[in-house]
Image (spheres, rainbow, N blue to C red):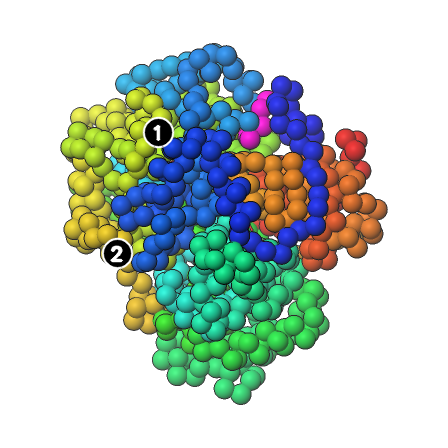
Amino acid sequence: MASKPPAGDPVQDAPQVEAPQHVAAGLPAIGHTLKIARQQMGVARTARTLLKVNQKDGFDCPGCAWPEGDKRHVAEFCENGAKAVAEEATLRRVTPDFFAAHPVADLASRSGYWLGQQGRITQPVYLPEGADRYEAVTWERACEIVAEELTALSSPDEALFYTSGRTSNEAAFLLQLFAREFGTNNLPDCSNMCHESSGSALTETLGVGKGSVSLEDLHQADLIIIAGQNPGTNHPRMLSALEKAKQSGAKIISVNPLPEAGLERFKNPQTPQGILQGTALTDLFLQIRIGGDQALFRLLNKLVIEADGGVDEDFVREHTHGYAAFATAAAETDWDETLTATGLDRRDIERALGMILASRRTIACWAMGLTQHKHSVVSIKEIVNLLLLRGSIGRPGAGVCPVRGHSNVQGDRTMGIFERPAPAFLDALEKEFGFAPPRQHGLDVVRSIRALRDGEAKVFFAMGGNFVAATPDTEVTEAAVRRARLTVHVSTKLNRSHAVTGARALILPTLGRTDKDVQGSGRQFVTVEDSMGMVHASRGNLPPASPHLLSEPAIVARMARAVLGPGSGTPWEDFEHDYATIRDRISRVVPGFEDFNTRIARPGGFTLPHAPRDERRFPTATGKANFTAAPVEHPELPEGRLLLQTLRSHDQYNTTIYGLDDRYRGIRGGRRVVLVNPEDAAELGFADGDYADLVGEWKDGVERRAPGFRVVHYPTARGCAAAYYPETNVLVPLDATADTSNTPASKSVVVRLEQSPSA
Ligand SMILES: Nc1nc2c(c(=O)[nH]1)N[C@H]1C(S)=C(S)[C@@H](COP(=O)(O)OP(=O)(O)OC[C@H]3O[C@@H](n4cnc5c(=O)[nH]c(N)nc54)[C@H](O)[C@@H]3O)O[C@H]1N2
Ligand SMILES: Nc1nc2c(c(=O)[nH]1)N[C@H]1C(S)=C(S)[C@@H](COP(=O)(O)OP(=O)(O)OC[C@H]3O[C@@H](n4cnc5c(=O)[nH]c(N)nc54)[C@H](O)[C@@H]3O)O[C@H]1N2
Ligand SMILES: [Mo]
């Protein structure tokens, strides 16, 4: 990446800095929402669209996976959900003329922000081998091209089928079916970079890799611990749930290296008193060092065990396994080591302990601040240990709450988008469809990149997402993808991945959540599963961006017919004609979806079963909830270095950049900023406003450099720094991943700052 904006790019990255805010939402949020929405959609479309967000007869917000309550507001969306909708429902268009005017090399020189601002793609386009630009192509020809390359492979395992988490249940089910009928489990997905660590930790300890709480549980909790999450930006509707919990007496502990405005005070724009006064949310802020969470919770667990009546002995005896070994390991925990690992004050840890012991119903919420480290899985397991000690699982108002990102990332997994499917799932697929699915595990995201790099994978197909920008080690990854024979992207909007292509490339434009979807049997809806296991319908209501768009299920169905040919016994045509026929199949393959079509007709949908939550049953290897006692780790930080986390600004959705501001953090007009504690900055010789190159340090000795970042003095924990993703993915080594889950460790990158020539 260049330190200056690429030539011809109108975007100027010139960050201006003011003091961070201490309040989230309120009236400024409403003003900002309407401004962005009107720019993209105009006034009439803005009203028509935003009033349908998250209504029972409307579409599921493509923003995040936070659930909706049963009682809905007229405007059931948040500032950032509205931006996500505006981004999709924009009136701007990318036509074949656009591609004629912009060769691939030109697209590759543009920023992700610029690409996204060009609008919705209107027609399928094809980049022939050796050509310098995409050209219009018919759907038939596009499917033939995919078939040519897939059938030419020497093994089905040379193909990769990536999924991003916006895909509906129906499309996801078809995609995994197609991939497995074709013969591979290579189904990497964004979850591999996101909550995979949560899934790994929860499956082993509780037997179900999903959260165990509902919205009502949050409202009833005595104590909510929020670790490694910035809900004010990334799950704004969660703030209303936290407000409600506070009003019923809940306490909140926030564990974060950064003070995040959304966790300090929330001004609910839905109520008059909310707009005026707001509610203070966090009672205790533990400003932890990056990666200190496992150490913190291990010490708290030791103190809980030592406290009188700290352990829920009935629960531990009846429902858990491994307590004795865990208690022995916890007893060895040392205060000094914990204080070093966490950077916290002894008094603050004692206050946290007091709050934990005073709570009968504790919920732990977390997101990427916990999942994207080398020791993420063991850190999350340590939080599970705490809840088990306190009996806070399978009790109203208590449980685990990994807060998911993409609006259907959890549903995609439920539908079988997983490179390591359970044998029972494959058995059910085999029984229903009468072919033998491959049994050997496929490749996750990081392994897929290695396979492309090493020439072992040759066709890359993406159902949504922005693979090269979202994944680590940008230079390595881009070079790897360029080695492919064919890259195919099913997309709504342009992004960097369309400019980094294999020898041949296709862009297949698709309907989004907001678009009306009409097939042979009439108007269709799709279904999604939120972060709390609620499944419900989503119906778009806008005329599609162009008459040439196909829905995601239609694209997979047509591609499958072209690739698998008449030999496939699967009724792909019926699936495209009527999505209810897909749901029929899902109801017979996926547990919890019995009578899917009948139950989805109920307004608001239904909740999937969850054994630990519903009946304190733990389908683990031991048949009990498992205590685990991994050795405590925390990142090593050499002298003169900083531990960099790569995170989201308020004006982005992953790799989609809505604007160049990060309002709550006081940053405007630019994204190339690095937030550094003033004392660290002074020690390293950087004043606020200096420019620095971020240089990654990793044991492979390769220099990874992200040039030209404005240093911002910011109250983050000592030794820590923060900068936005995806710009900083150049710094994340491909091999730096979490143990067990293999998630890129993009929240703990060791860097040094070098004076930047672009100062
Ligand atoms: N508007 C908007 N909404 C989104 C998204 C978006 O980009 N924009 N993305 C969606 C997706 S896919 C996801 S996964 C979620 C992401 O939601 P978040 O996980 O909230 O996103 P991040 O910006 O990565 O923020 C990580 C938080 O963890 C903290 N943190 C970093 N390291 C540590 C650590 O070692 N310990 C602790 N305790 N905290 C740490 C950071 O300071 C930050 O507050 O949001 C979803 N919703
Ligand atoms: N350094 C660093 N890297 C990270 C992270 C981090 O915190 N730090 N976070 C990771 C996380 S949590 C995640 S989830 C991944 C995200 O990785 P991805 O899911 O791959 O990335 P997105 O930016 O969400 O994808 C945006 C693109 O999706 C397409 N799109 C949008 N809506 C639709 C739709 O309805 N259908 C289809 N077919 N396409 C659509 C558009 O073309 C858009 O450009 O990034 C990961 N990468
Ligand atoms: Mo995510």
Mark 1, residue position: 510
* Mark seen at residue 692: none
Left or right for 692, reference 704: right
Relative height, residue 195 to residue 558 (above, below): below
User: CA–CA distance between discs 2 and 1?
Assistant: 27 Å
Mark 2, residue position: 606
Left or right for 532, reference 451: left
Query: How far across and how far down the image is residue 255, in percent?
Result: 59, 63
Between 722 and 9, the residue placed more toward the observer is 9
Kindly identify the amino acid type of the residue bearing the numbered disc 1. Answer: Thr
Kindly identify the amino acid type of the residue bearing the numbered disc 2. Answer: Phe
Q: Secondary structure at mark 1?
A: loop
Query: How far across and how far down the image is residue 741, in percent?
Result: 48, 52
Left or right for 215, reference 642: left
Q: Quadrant of the N terminus?
A: top right
Q: Quadrant of the C terminus?
A: top right
Predominant secondary structure, magenta span: loop
Q: Looking at the image, can residue 423 be seen?
A: no
Q: Residue at x 27, y 53 (%)?
A: 604
Q: Farthest bottom residue?
A: 308
Q: Is mark 1 within 8 Å of ligand 2?
A: yes
Q: Residue at x 52, y 18 (%)?
A: 104
Between 111 and 138, the residue placed more toward the observer is 111
Q: Quadrant of residue 508?
A: top left
Left or right for 667, reference 486: right
Disc with the residue nearer the chain's start (2 vs 1): 1
Between 175 and 566, the residue placed more toward the observer is 175
Q: Residue at x 44, y 81 (%)?
A: 312
Q: Secondary structure at mark 2?
A: strand
Q: Residue at x 42, y 79 (%)?
A: 316
Which span is picked out in magenta?
109-113
